[in-house]
Amino acid sequence: MSFAAGTDYLKTEMDLQTLAAPTDSLATHGLIVERLGDGSLKANVAHVRYHSTAGVDAGYPGSGPADLALSVLHELLPPPSPEQEQAQFDLDEEALERAMMDPQRWSETIGIDKVRVSKLALMLHQDFKAHVIAKLDADSDYVPIATIRAWIANARRRLRV
């Protein structure tokens, strides 16, 4: 799936300030990024610190954009609870074997903050960075939730999960 910078979406969707209102969320509207006066990037998603302690970023293929990609996927592909994950070990052998092949059913604890993320989000975040986050305008941009969900669905089909 190809992705064009979100400026085209800004012409057809609400303006960036409306989208970035505190009551809006990633899952409702999509990803909103805006460069602040101090040079940092503000996004409407909590930072999952894994590659970059300096913060999230966009518009190039670096560690800040990798964290932004992981943060977006972490919110949209949450990990199973520890109880759900543990319960899978009680499955019969065949069901457990199928479960072992589905990265959405497992988690990993990562980063300096020890955040539990789904293995699927972890597997996909570098591709999401390359195909979407690195192509964003580095100053401000918007990616509709439908675009993000379509990218995830295509990635899952490629992985057959």
Image (spheres, rainbow, N blue to C red):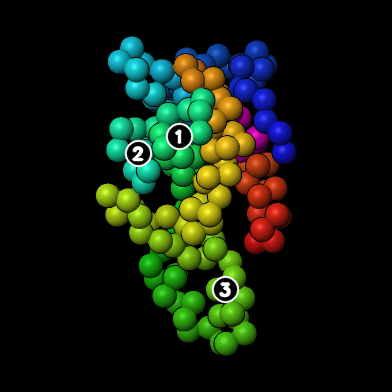
Identify the secondary structure beneath mark 2: loop
Q: Amino acid at mark 3?
A: Ala
Label placed on residue 52: 2
Q: From the image, tell me which residue sits under label 3.
A: 99
Quarter in which the N terminus is drawn? top right
Q: Is residue 125 visible?
A: yes
Magenta-drawn stretch contains 146: yes
Cα–Cα span, label 2 and label 3: 31 Å
Q: Residues within 10 Å of mark 3 (few under 14, many from 20)?
A: some
Amino acid under disc 2: Ser
Place residue 80 in its image quadrant.
bottom left
Mark 2 in CB contact with mark 1 (< 8 angstroms): yes
Magenta span: chief secondary structure: helix
Task: Tell which tag, 2 or 3, sits nearer the viewer.
Answer: 2
Image vertical order of residue 143 relative to residue 152, above or below = above
Q: Quadrant of residue 99?
A: bottom right
Residue 130: image location, x then y, percent: 57, 37
- Sooner in the amino-acid sequence: mark 3 or mark 1: 1
Q: Marks 2 and 1, Cα distance to the nearest angstrom?
A: 9 Å
Q: Position of residue 48 (x, y in %)?
A: 37, 43
Amino acid at the residue labelled 1:
Gly
Q: Which of pointers 2 and 3 lies earlier in the amino acid sequence? A: 2
